[in-house]
Amino acid sequence: MKGFASMLKKNQATNLTAIIPIGRVKDDLKILKSWIEESREFPLKLILVHDISEKSTTDQISKLANSFEESKILLIQGKFGSPGFARNAGLELVKSEWVAFWDCDDKPMLKDIFNGIADSNVKDEVIVGGFQVKNASNNFVNDKFSINPSLRSISLNPGLWRMIFKTELIKNLRFTGFKLAEDHLFMAEIKLPERKINFVSKSFYEYVFGGENQLTSKKSNLDDLRLASTLLMSTTRLQLNPKVIFFNLTLIFRQQFTLVKKGNFRLKFQALLFLANCALKTKPQTHWIGIKAFVFVLTQLRGSKLS
């Protein structure tokens, strides 16, 4: 094992870039500020992509970015309209070996992330860690929420933020403009189950849920979830690898159960109709894969904290 310290001695050049979309934050960047100073100690570059919505946020972010050299923090500001389009703007500028996608209201565990990179194999394309879940209203942190990452745990809790990607793998891919499930579509596009993945049993990330600014908390964004399921299903019907099919169907069923739980009457009805059509129109050779994926989501989703 190379270890984090030896990695720093060997190469101080940036080997990870993190792209962080920032929207309306209502004068609150305290979580970002709580760890961003620590980032100076790591071979890390942060690309802050500000989707401009209010002057107070612009002033806060500009002040924060100006306290660092451009080699450490690059600030991009514009009208993007979605986290996916904001990430695309940052992705075009990535030059490091690895790239990650983090949210401004969560906290990455930098030491464990860089230890994961240091201990990775040269053939690894994706590194996946566990994560912790924190309640924004009472600051309660669950113990390691996903201590043993696996493909199944990713499909149930598909947090893009606990993944580190080889830049070469994704440099030509782009996110959709959906405000929900754009990361699900991204994972499906790279056919994640076919990639060389290094699963790390350390927690890479503290995910904060229940914040008032989160897109997952806005019911007006749920229609994007329905559209994402439709796109993902059309892609899945073209797949031949059973692992890819199971992974995609798990994502789809997860999305539909979220709509049943959180959607209005129209979305609930459409979700139930969608699930019925999935059962009727699935190809015979993938029918049992669909049943297994459905049962897996149905039995496991209760433990998930993510929408």
Image (cartoon, helix red, strand yellow):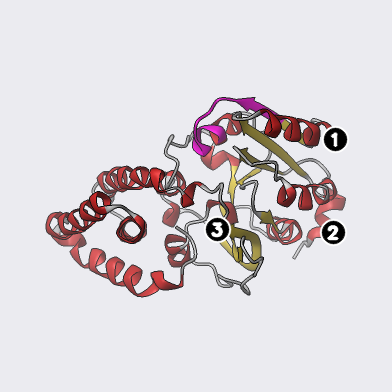
The label number, if any, that marks residue 210 in the structure image: 3
| Dot 3 and dot 1 residues touching (CB under 8 Å) | no
Mark 1, residue position? 67
x then y, percent, for residue 94: 65, 34
Q: Which of marks 1 and 2 is nearer the N terminus?
A: 2
At 43% from the left and 64% from the top, the residue drawn is 156
- Tell me the amino acid under the disc marked 3: Gly
Q: Which of marks 3 and 2 is nearer the N terminus?
A: 2
Is 229 left or right of 220, judged from the image as shown? Answer: left
Q: In the rendered structure, which segment of residues is drawn in magenta?
A: 75-86
Of 101 and 77, nearer the camera is 77
At 30% from the left and 59% from the top, the residue drawn is 260
x then y, percent, for residue 193: 42, 57
Outermost residue toward the right in this view: 9
x then y, percent, for residue 8: 84, 52
- Tell me the amino acid under the disc marked 1: Ser
User: Real-space Cα distance between discs 3 and 2?
Assistant: 36 Å
- Tell me the amino acid under the disc marked 2: Ala
